[in-house]
Image: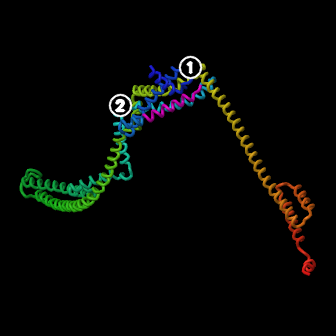
Amino acid sequence: MARRRRLGDGLAVLAGARPDLLEAAPGARAKFVALGGVLLSTGGLAVLSAAFAVSMALGVWWPFALLVGLGWGLVIVNLDRMLLVGMAHDGSVKRNLLMAVPRVGLALVLGIVISTPLTLQIFHKEIDTEIVALQAEASDAYKQSLDADARFAGLPELRAKVAEGQAVVASGGTAAADLTPLQQRVSTAQAAYDAALVTQRELSAKAQCELDGTCGTGDAGRGEAYLQARAAADAQADVVAAAKTDLDAAVAAVSAGATRSMQQAATDLETDRAELARLTEQQTELQAAFDETNSDNTGILIRLKALSSLSDSDATMAMAHYMLALLFICVELLPVLMKMLLNFGPRSTYDRLTDLRDDGDLEIEQLQQSARVEVEQAQQELLVMAEKERVDRQKEQVLNRRRARLAAAVAQRAEVAQRAEVPPELVAEAAVESSGRKPWDTGPILDLARSAASRTVRTIRRRPEERVAERV
C-alpha cells in the first residue's frame, strides 16, 4: 500500500502537483495521478517512436536505438510537463484560451512527429512491398535520364553505326551504302544482258525453225528467210556480248568498291567499338552505382513516399493510415486537453490553496525583505557611527600631540628667553598671541621661535666698545 502511494505521489508530482498542498487537499490527488499516468503514456509512445525512427533512418542496433528512444521520451515528458505546469487556472475564459491555444498547437506538432514512425512501423509490410516498386521506378527514371544525358546522347547513332559496320564486314563490303549506285548499275547491266540474251535466243530459235521449215515461210532449207533470221540472230549475239562486257565491268566495279568499303568499315568498326564500349561501360557503372544506392534506400523518406502512394491508390489504406495517426496524435494531446478542460471548470480546493499559499509566501518574502532592509540600514548606521568615533579619536589624538608639542615649544622658548634675558612680558605676549590661534596652527610657534632666536643673538652679541673696555 505504501509503495502504491509513493508511486501515486510520484505521478502527481510528475503532473505538476505540490505534495504539501495535496496533503491539505487530498481530493485533487486522483486528478494529478491520472495526468501523470497520461504523461508516462505519451513518454512511452515517444520512446517507441524514436527507437523505430532511428532504426529506420540509420539501421542501428536495437539496444542503441532503444537508448536513443529513452532520451527522446524524457524530452517529450519534460515538454509535456512544462505545458501542464504553465497552464495555471484562471477565472477568465479568454485568458484560458490564450494560454491553451499555443500549448495545444505545440502538442499537436509533437503528436504528428511521434505518430509518424509508429504508423510506418505498423504498416511496414505493405510499405516494404511498395518500396520495391518505387525503387524500380526510380531505376527506370534514372536510366532514361542517362539516355537523355549529353554525354550519352550519341549512343544510339554509335550503336547503329557499329551494327552497320558489322553488316558491311560480314557481307564482304557489299552492304556498304556507297555501293548502291554501283549495285544499281550492275542490276541495270544484268537486266540489259538478260534481255539481250533472251532476244538472241528467240532470234536463234526463229532462224532454226526457218531452217527446219516448222515456222515462218514453212520452206525448209537455207532460203532467204533463214539467212535474214540468222543474220538478225548473229547481230543480236554482238549485242549480248556488249551487254556482257558492261555487266562484267559493273560487277568488277562493285567488287572493287566492296573491297574498299570492307577495309574502311573494318578500320572504323574498331574505333567505334572501343568508343561504344567506353560509353556503355561508363553508363553501366553509373546505373550500377545508382541501383546500389537505390536498393539501400529504405529510410524514413521513401517510407513516407510509399505510405502516401499506398494511401492515394487504396481508400481503405488511406482511412486506416489517417485514423491510426489521429489516434496517436490524440494520445499526445490528451494531457494538455485534460488540463485545459480542468481550467475551464470552477476553481477547485487545490487551486484556492495554491493561491493562498502563493500569497502567503509572497507576504512572508516581503516581510523578510523589509526586515533585511531594516537590518541592513541599522548595520550601515552602526558602521557610520563607528567610523565617526574612530575619526573623532584620531582627531583627539592629533590635538593632544599638537598641544604637547606646543607646550614643549613654549617651555623651550621660556628657557631660551630666560637665558637670553628676554623680558617675561615678551614671553607672555608670545604665549597669549599663540594661544589665540588654533592648536594645529604651527605658525605662531615657528614665529615665536624665530623671534626669540634673533633677540637672543642680538642680546648676547657685544658691542666693539665693550669688548675693548673689557680688554683694558
In the rendered view, would you say 201 is above or below 85?
below
How far is mark 1 from mark 2, CA to CA? Answer: 52 Å
Query: As rendered, which of 464 and 291 lies closer to the eye?
Result: 464
Q: Position of residue 298 (x, y in %)?
A: 36, 38
Asked if the stretch drawn in magenta spans residue 82, the answer is yes
Q: Which secondary structure lies at badge 1? A: loop
**Image quarter hosting the N terminus:** top left
> Going from the N terminus, do you reach mark 1 or mark 2 first?
1
* Mark 2 Cα shell of 10 Å, populated few (<14), some (14-19), many (≥20): some
Q: Position of residue 21 (x, y in %)?
A: 57, 23
Query: As rendered, which of 118 and 342 lies closer to the eye?
Result: 342
Can residue 330 be seen in the rendering of this structure? no
| Label 1 vs label 2, nearer the camera | 1
Tell me which amino acid carries mark 2: Glu
Highlighted range, magenta: 70-88
Which mark identifies residue 25?
1
Taking the spot 42% from the left edge, 34% from the top edge, the residue there is 69
Q: Quadrant of residue 251?
A: bottom left
Q: Position of residue 2 (x, y in %)?
A: 45, 21
The residue at the far bottom in this view is 472
Q: Tell me: 283 left or right of 436.
A: left
Asked if the stretch drawn in magenta spans residue 391, the answer is no
Q: Which secondary structure lies at badge 2? A: helix
* Mark 1 Cα shell of 10 Å, populated few (<14), some (14-19), many (≥20): some
By secondary structure, the bulk of the magenta-drawn segment is best described as helix
Can residue 3 be seen in the rendering of this structure? yes
Q: Quadrant of residue 84?
A: top right
Reading the image, the residue beneath label 2 is 126
The residue at the far front in this view is 472
**Image quarter hosting the C terminus:** bottom right
Q: Tell me: 448 left or right of 371.
A: right
Tell me which amino acid carries mark 1: Ala
